[in-house]
Image (cartoon, rainbow, N blue to C red):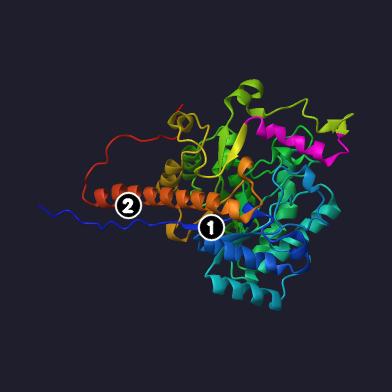
Amino acid sequence: MEAAQVRQFEPKLMKLSVLTAALQELTPREVRDADPDRAVEEWLEFARELDLDYIQLSAALHPTEADVPAEAMLDPVANTLDLRRPMSPSRSNRILAAMRRNNIGLSDVAYFDNMLHEDPAIRRKKHDFMLRVMDSAVALGADAVCGFVGRNQALDLDQNLDDFQDSFIPLLKAARDRNLVYRVEQCPMPGWTTGDNFHNNIGYAPALWIALHRIAEKAGVADQFRIHYDPSHAILMGQDTRSIFQYLKDSGYAFLIGGFHVKGQVVNAKGVAAWGYGGQTVLRGDRKDGKPSANPRDQANAWLKQVVLCEHELPGTARHDPLAYLQNRTVDWLDHQLAARELLDIDVSRTFLVVEHEYPPARIQDKNRLLPVLKGSIAFTRAIDRAAACMYALQHEVLAAQGIRVQGIGREAYRS
């Protein structure tokens, strides 16, 4: 009888990173406005204290240039990377020196905004800024940018597919010209408008990812279009990670996910009972006399479409709740990491796992107070990924090589 093949135990870990919007005010505004690259330098130092090897560098239009007031945002964005002036050799050299000094790299450069805005002038401003983001990614040695697609509010969703072809494909071509990948995060952004639309980022679900990728494929930029998967948005829409990954595999698109945001969502069952998964549709206070309230703080109530249903989770801060996992009412992080390995076409050791902090009670703008919170979440994320890596290597490699069966059944995709 032929001896069984022996496969060594070699678990493969993902690369851990953090989105710098986790602490927006690390460098005071009066300091970083006068010396923009100081904010990046201080975040690199902070990342070293967090025991990280990478950061996801957040860029955004400066508050003086943004079309949405900060008061109207649920989670104000961070312009850690200030691009009022384009990246120059002197700026990139300074940041690269800080990266070397702290031994911290970039997972990518992120700019989350509506690339299909219906106002041509506003859209042009956002596209020009994204091109600056792409140039910065190249100058700083990153191979990807991360952001949204968005939605043209003047068009229906089918028409938005045509707008994607006309207006977003040029951004993918710009990424191709720079040897970059554009990773799209799938948040539906329900609070982006005080109107009735829930889906304001058309790249919100797997079937649409595939539709958009097919458009990109026809335009010759398929390799530039990838998804930066965030399980919190799946929970918001009643989906579970394993079924999403299985759907992509069944459809021949297991390659589409190119990175991960590690951010959870904890569903408020009482909110679902009151409003269903469509969110709060009336009596929010974001509209007055049939139009958006003149007070930007009132407009932030548009986010009740989402927050009446659930609250963002910083990994490790939500209670362990097996029943909630089975009901898709919070993220089962261990199964998330297992499913990624079992179902997706990824190179695990080159894939980034980016911690994103949007848990409201812990949105602390004080470094000393936030440090142990973020450090604990990052340690939790690392431990969960290690546990999944060990389970996968043991079951799918070591045991499989010797023909030893794995016990039990485990979570199943599409199970009702």
The residue indicated by pointer 2 is 393
48 or 147, nearer to the observer: 48
Q: Please, what secondary structure does the residue beneath circle 1 have?
A: strand
Residue 293: percent from left, percent from top: 86, 35
Q: Quadrant of residue 220?
A: bottom right
Q: CA distance from mark 2 to mark 1?
A: 23 Å
**Badge 1 density bin: few <14, some 14–19, many ≥20, Cα 10 Å:** many
Q: Which mark is residue 128?
A: none
Residue 158: percent from left, percent from top: 71, 40
Query: Which residue is pictured at 50% across the width and 40% down the height?
Result: 241
Query: Which residue is pictured at 46% across the width and 42% down the height?
Result: 333
Q: Residue furthest top?
A: 273
The residue indicated by pointer 1 is 17
| Amino acid type, residue under disc 2 in the picture | Ala
Q: Quadrant of residue 177?
A: bottom right
Question: Can you say whether 20 is above or below 327 in the image?
Answer: below
Q: Residue furthest left?
A: 1
Q: Please, what secondary structure does the residue beneath circle 2 have?
A: helix
Instruction: Left or right? Give the position of 362 relative to 131.
Output: left
The segment highlighted magenta reads 292-309
- Can the viewer see residue 248 in this picture? yes
Residue 301 is covered by the magenta coloring: yes
220 or 185, nearer to the observer: 185
